[in-house]
Each structure stands twice: as C-alpha cells, then as structure tokens.
Image (cartoon, rainbow, N blue to C red):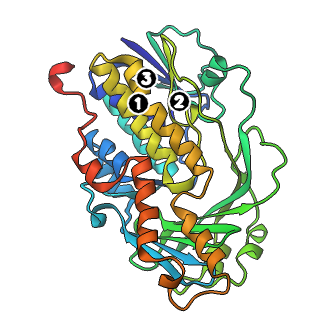
Amino acid sequence: MRVVIAGAGIAGLTAALSLHAAGITDVTVHEAVEELHPLGVGINILPHAIRELIELGLGDRLARIGVATADLTFLTARGQRIWSEPRGLAAGYRWPQYSIHRGRLQMMLLEAVRERLGPGAVVLGSPVTSLDHDADLLVGADGIRSSVRQALFPDEGEPLPGGDVLWRGTTYARPFMTGRSMLMVGDSTQKLVIYPIAPPGDDGTQLINWAIQRAAHVEGVPRGDWNRPIGVERVLPHVEGWHCDELDVRALIAGAHQVFEYPLVDRDPLPYWSTERVTLMGDAAHPMYPTGSNGGTQAVIDARVLAYALGTGQGLKFYEEQRRPVTSTIVLANRGDGPEVILRLAHQRAPDGFADIEDVLPLAEREEIALHYKKLAGFEPATLNARRSWSVPAREH
C-alpha cells in the first residue's frame, strides 16, 4: 500500500511513524515549505496522546525536550485560588502529560521519521494541491487551510472567526511553583494560561509559555502567516492590576522575547472525512479552539487510529467511526469554555472576590466540570488506563 501524506506537522509526521509501525512502509510526507524550522510557541499534549507517542518508542525523546506537567491551578484575576488538580502521573494516569515547544516536538518527530522511513520520506517544497496523486491513499494533514479538504469541500469557505484574539509568547524566567505547574488565570472577559515548556537551563531559567485569550473584534481571518509578531506593549495593558502570588504576571509578559497574535478560529464539523482513496486528520479534519489543550493531542490520536485501521484491514470506515464523532463533539464543546468555565463562573458569582470558594463554587461542582471535559475528550483516567492499545499486533503486519 502506498500512502502520501500532505503536511509535515504533528499530525502528518505522527501518521508516518504510526503507519510504519503498523507495517505500512511505503509512505511519503509532502510539505509545502522549503525548509522546516522549530517555529511556534507552547503546546500541551495530554496523557492519551502521550501514550501513543510512548508506544511509538518516543518516550525518552519527549522526556528530554518537554516538561512533565505536574499540576493545574485556576486563579481569578485577583489571584484567588478556585481549583487545583494533579496532572499526568500524579493524577493516576499510566502516562505523563507534557508541556513542550511545538517546534521542538515537530523537529523530534521529523528526525524520527527520517531515521525509520529514510531520509527521503519527507519531501520539502512539495505542496499537495489536488486529489490527483499517485497513491493508494492520500492523507490530508495540511492544517486549517488544507488543500485536500478544500478539494473535497470546495464550497466551504473561510475558517470561522470566534470573535476572540489570542496573544501568545514565551519568556525565559525562573521556575514558578513546582517548576512543572500550569496556571489558568482569568475572569469572564479574558483568560491567561502559563506553563513551562522546557527544563531549566544552566542559568536556572526555563522557557515559559503564556497565552492570553480576549474578546476582540477580528476583521476577517488573515491569510498567509497567522503568527503575526506584535510588540509586547500591545498586550501589557490587558494584565494591569492582575495579581498572582505564584509569579509576577506583568513581569513575565514584559520579559517576552517574542509575542504573536492569532485570530481565534475553527471550522464546523464535516459530514464525512473520507472518500475511497482520500482522508483527513488533525486540523485539516477538525480545527478547534485551543480550549482544554486538545488540538495537537487529537491529531496524534487521529494518526494512530488511522494506522491501526489500515494495518488491521478495517479501513477508512473504521477510522472515521472512531474519530469523527469524538472530534466533532470536542470542536463544538470548545466553542464554549470547556473546563475553563470555572473562571467565568467564579467571576460571575463573586465579581468582587470571595472569602471561601466553597460559597461560590462548591467542590463537587468543580470536580464535575473537570471530569465532564475529561470524559468528553477521551482522557478520563480509569477509562484511558484500561483502554486497548492502538498499536497493531506484530502478527497482523
């Protein structure tokens, strides 16, 4: 079986590795850009996707370049603690959660593909622009502006702006809290997420990712490079007056060595992903808002399930049955607040702060919000720990 993959991002490279592991070795990844660089900012990969990467033999590489997230804490803009929970191994998963630089993750996957499938397995400067390809299967893993998706659905139009803007940046700073902690800070109008994405260096600092999501008027959806660089002075006024005992939010953002602006966009779920010789995955199939750290995570799982479906002879129908309903649900759920709804609820119920969070958001309600999203997105600990592997048994290769 000959497979052509459009796009050398996280989805496409993980798909190549997964297909190879499933015994499908005639795989070529075509990437539009002439040269790949470790671009981007931070990304969280949740335990159900880290499981898949570890089962691909990438656990040691992940541990070298990422941070195994230990805990997640929600704070009001005043710095009052709403909710804390353990993450990864500390939460009872058999696999960690990693916070990592997206570009470093992509380069790690690229290196693994070239090692296992050969140096010619990834062809740069080679965009896939139509469905007419010399392959048994064309996999569209070419992002939210996927040419493969456009060929399947030519009348779909532009991505849908959500009305919010994202400012994302990275700063070298001293570790905060455990050095492996993740913070969500906010109210009903904006939220800020902060987490480290690399181990501390020799100077004692580590690269810390931060992102602010704020309601803003978006004039259409820009084409070309969405990672529009902006000055940090554009962002600082929006965190004036925010207080956080765990770290100095303003100083963290003021010290950024790069800041980018993104429109918050997604697309409506599709009625199908596949034809006889074409399918979609990752952002090409289900672009979603970055709520709940699920974009990259779901792309990894897509890749593994597709390889399992093909490697076991169950085909694209099985792949879609397993993945399309789940990801469609997440896309729609992420248009709300996901687990971050507790920031909005705490602000609405106690805009001037509170003496005891139990009077505002009882523990049982907070626990239910967190568990509901884990179940929806497929990473409730007990279920994930007991789930079968998506690795194809060697006898079926």
Q: Specify whether residue 181 is in view.
A: no
Residue that mark 3 sits on: 120
Q: Is 367 drawn above or below residue 299 in the view shown?
A: below
Q: Amino acid at mark 1?
A: Ala
Give the distance between the C-alpha atoms of the residues marked 2 and 3, in whole angstroms: 18 Å
Percent position of residue 172, x then y: 54, 71
Give the distance between the C-alpha atoms of the residues marked 3 and 1, in whole angstroms: 16 Å
Q: What mark, if any, has residue 100 been given in the picture? A: none
Percent position of residue 386, x then y: 22, 47
Res 256 → quadrant: bottom right
Say which of 127 and 182 sits in front. Answer: 182
Q: In percent of the image, x 41 and y 19: which residue is there?
A: 317
Say which of 381 and 278 sits in front. Answer: 381
Percent position of residue 145, x then y: 66, 32
Labels 3, 1: front one: 1
Labels 2, 3: front one: 2
Look at the numbered disc 2 and give the secondary structure of its residue.
loop
Percent position of residue 396, x then y: 19, 20
Residue that mark 2 sits on: 141
Q: Amino acid at mark 2?
A: Ala
| Quadrant location, the N terminus | top left
Give the distance between the C-alpha atoms of the residues marked 2 and 1, in whole angstroms: 9 Å
Q: In percent of the image, x 34 and y 31: which residue is there?
A: 18
Q: Amino acid at mark 3?
A: Gly
Say which of 83 and 308 sits in front. Answer: 83
Q: Specify whether residue 67 is in view.
A: yes
Q: Please report whichever mark, 3 or 1, sits nearer to the chain's N-terminal start.
A: 1
- Contact check, label 2 and label 1, Cβ < 8 Å: yes
- Contact check, label 3 and label 1, Cβ < 8 Å: no
Residue that mark 1 sits on: 15
Q: Badge 2 local density, few (<14 within 10 Å), some, or many (20+)?
A: many
Q: Is 293 drawn above or below residue 232 in the view shown?
A: above
